Amino acid sequence: MTRKFAGDTLLVATHNKGKLEEMAHLLQPFGVKVVGASDMNLPEPEETEDTFVGNARIKAHAAAMATGLPSLSDDSGITIDALNGAPGVYTADWAETENGRDFLMAMTRANTELENLNAPHPRTAQFRCTLVLAWPDGHDEVFEGVAPGHLVWPIRGKDGFGYDPMFVPQGHETTYAEMDRWEKNKISHRAAAVSKFVAGCFG
C-alpha cells in the first residue's frame, strides 16, 4: 500500500527552476506548497549510484533528513538500445565540459557511436524518469515513467533541452524539441512518472 502524502509542504529536491515550476503546477489542485532545494539552501549531494532509482534516493533522503520535510527528487536520462542502454545515468555527464554542459556535443557522441556500430534503423531509445518521495523517517515510494521512441539525425527543433532535438516519441513524427513545451509535458517520461506519483500519494 502506497503511503499517502499528508503534509502541506513538499520539498522538491532540485535546483532546476523549470522542474520546480512544473511540479508546483501539477500539484496546485491539491493545495500543496512546493519549495525547492535552493529555497532551503541545500547543497547538491554527490550522485554515486549507477541506477536512476539509486541516485534519486540519494537526493530525496538527503533533503528529507536535512529539512524534516517529505522530499521528492527525480533522476532521469536517455537509454539507447543499440548502445546497451548508454548513456543512461550518465546522460548529463556526456555533456559536461569545462565551460558547462554542451548537449550538442553529447548528441553528436551518441550519433557517432551509433554510426560506428552501423546500428540499424529505427534506432530505438527511451527517456526515463524515476521519482522518489522520501519521508524524514526513512520511508520512500518510487514511481517510474518511460517514454519510448527513436533517434533521428540531423537534429531537429529549437525548443526543449538535453537530447530532445534527436528524440522522436513513439506515435509522433516530430522531435521533443519541435513540440510546444506543454504538448511535450503531456506525453513525457516525467509526466508519466508524475501521474503515477499523484495517483499513488494523493489519490
Image (cartoon, grey):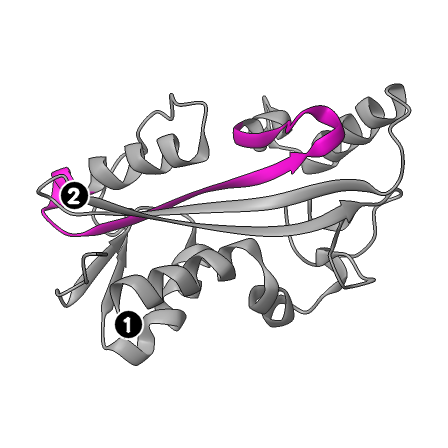
Q: Is residue 196 above or below residue 94?
A: below
Q: Secondary structure at mark 2?
A: loop
In magenta stretch: residue 67: yes
Residue at the spot 67% in from the left edge and 50% down from the top edge? 148
Question: Residue 63: percent from the left, percent from the top?
Answer: 21, 41
Residue at the spot 83% in from the left edge and 46% down from the top edge? 155
117 vs 158, left or right, is: right
Question: Residue 198: percent from the left, percent from the top?
Answer: 34, 66
Q: CA distance from mark 2 to mark 1?
A: 19 Å
67 vs 14, left or right, is: left
Question: Residue 40: percent from the left, percent from the top?
Answer: 20, 48
Question: Residue 17: percent from the left, percent from the top?
Answer: 42, 55
Residue at the spot 62% in from the left edge and 39% down from the top edge? 78
Amino acid at the residue labelled 2: His
113 vs 138, left or right, is: right
Label 2 packing within 10 angstroms: few (<14), some (14-19), many (20+) = few
24 vs 85, left or right, is: left
Asked where in the image residue 160 lies, by quadrant, the reply is bottom right
Figure quadrant of the C terminus: bottom left
Q: Which residue is mark 1?
A: 203
Q: Secondary structure at mark 1?
A: loop
Q: Is residue 81 above or below residue 70?
A: above
Asked where in the image residue 124 lies, by quadrant, the reply is top right
Q: Which residue is mark 2?
A: 139
Amino acid at the residue labelled 1: Gly
Residue range of the region highlighted in magenta in the rendering: 64-89
